[in-house]
DNA sequence: TAAGATAGTGAACAATAGGCGAACAATTAT
DNA sequence: ATAATTGTTCGCCTATTGTTCACTATCTTA
């Protein structure tokens, strides 16, 4: 579906987004792809958009969103083969460390939506999780309590795998600590300086706070559920 | 459905895509199939597209996407198990004490609800899963396709972890093979000699079959989802 | 609010890579 | 036998990429 350059750029955007939560600028992408002009980036971006891999707001800075992944970043070992071209000496760009096919133990911090800052109940137990499920960064797990996110397919008792970050984009599901007191799992939306936390359950109301009142503690990266 | 060459090319494309995420060019496919000209590739591609195995953006470079897998990759038809008689002895309940806090690799059998017997697309890839999520017994994974179970919190793209069994109780979510043809994930219910498969989506209708038409291939044991 | 800085658009040109398709022969399946 | 599939040649057209340059849009800040 993608050409080499398109793929390279998509990966870069994706990693950058996961890492920092902020879209790279054209300038940065230009550097990353080792181009001399932003025009090339522009065209690649257009191609990616045409192919449905990213979405963007035209004329807006750093407003990229990755919609699809290229096929190869899923379930597989992902051994990065280095083509080792004879003619190009420096190739330090694209660190893009592919997550290994390992398993990592992530701390289980207790239940969320319990009206307690999750930091407080720093747990002792851990949950083994296939690394392939998670991206880069540090993660932790929370047991979901309540039904406020059922319409997003997140049920009571599920384990939410959360990536630690304090930035997130609109529409992402985040662990938000409100006024230092209450941690909840909600959709994050920003509206003219305010932060809105949307539940995924028609029975609950969206909550709006000043941006100083809400601290993003992580974004939802995965989900585990057990049936009996 | 596919000729030898078409099959060969499809496999190549698929592997390449999984491997690198970048579509092969005609030139590369030509090499892979050991042809002397791209024209042959062009015809094969057209044939594959016509048959619905791949999708492409015409007049775009390296814009291929695999939609279906060839079915006969393992030549292994569904294992016809002797139907459980009324007086059947207790199943050899594999005690198989799962390593408590470990991880096991379970085979990923492809997508379900694709109108193809899952047994047929014995995959190659596996999915690492924390053993704690699963109980005893043999398991496999399926990627969920479609939205027929959304009200049960099972979304398109989720991985269903399925325990192999041919018995299930009413109300359990099972992988059911209907008339040896179509495998679906549904709630199982029995009513006066018939078997009802209930979706968890008001937009779909329950389906009722004679008990001979439905073979339970497993029950849902866990669920795994990744967010991006 | 005007000046600058930063960011994104897009035309134009050139070079290369990639895709399209007719024509004809050889081979295989039904 | 008859149709479908395959291998090949050759030429043409289009897409992608790298680059330059000029322009527009947004944001910051004095």
Image (cartoon, coloured by chain):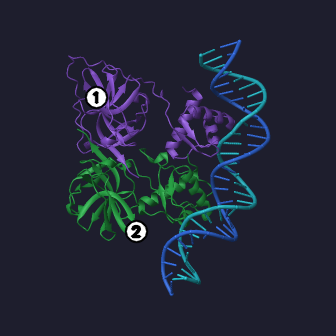
Chain colours: A green, B purple, C cyan, D blue
Give the residue at x 29% y 40%: B222
Mark 2 lies on residue: A192
The image position of residue A125, as x and y in percent, is: 21, 53
Residue A125, disc: none
Disc marking residue B165? 1
Count up the numbered dots.
Answer: 2
Q: Residues within 10 Å of mark 1 (few under 14, many from 20)?
A: some
Q: Where is residue B76 in the image (x, y as percent from the top left)?
A: 42, 24
The C terminus of chain A appears in which quarter of the rendering?
top left
Check disc 2 and report its element: helix, strand or loop.
loop
Residue at 51%, 58% (x, y): give it.
A56
Give the image location of residue B223, x and y in percent: 31, 42
Residue A126 visible in the current orientation: yes
Instruction: Say which quarter of the image contains residue B99.
Output: top left
**In the image, which is nearer the foreground, mark 1 or mark 2?**
2
Q: Are marks 1 and 2 on the same chain?
A: no
Q: Where the N terminus of chain A falls, by quadrant?
A: top right
Nearer the observer, B189 or B133? B189
């Amino acid at each position: 579906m993608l050409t080499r350059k398109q793929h390279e750029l998509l990966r870069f955007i994706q990693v950058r987004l996961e890492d920092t939560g902020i879209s790279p600028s054209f300038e940065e992408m230009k550097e990353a792809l080792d181009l001399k002009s932003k025009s090339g980036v522009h065209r690649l971006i257009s191609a990616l958009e045409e192919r449905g891999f990213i979405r963007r707001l035209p004329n807006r800075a750093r407003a990229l969103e990755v919609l699809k992944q290229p096929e190869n970043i899923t379930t597989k070992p992902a051994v990065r083969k280095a083509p080792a071209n004879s003619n190009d000496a420096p190739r330090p760009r694209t660190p893009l460390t592919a997550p290994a096919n390992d398993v990592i133990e992530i701390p289980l911090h207790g239940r969320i939506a319990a009206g307690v800052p999750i930091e407080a109940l720093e747990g002792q137990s851990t949950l083994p999780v296939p690394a392939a499920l998670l991206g880069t960064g540090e993660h932790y797990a929370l047991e979901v309590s309540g039904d406020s996110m059922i319409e997003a397919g997140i049920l009571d008792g599920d384990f939410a795998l959360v990536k630690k970050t304090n930035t997130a984009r609109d529409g992402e599901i985040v662990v938000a600590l409100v006024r230092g007191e209450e941690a909840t799992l909600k959709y994050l939306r920003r509206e003219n300086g305010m932060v809105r936390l949307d539940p995924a359950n028609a029975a609950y109301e969206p909550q709006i706070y000043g941006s100083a009142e809400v601290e993003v503690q992580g974004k939802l990266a995965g989900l585990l559920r057990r049936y009996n």
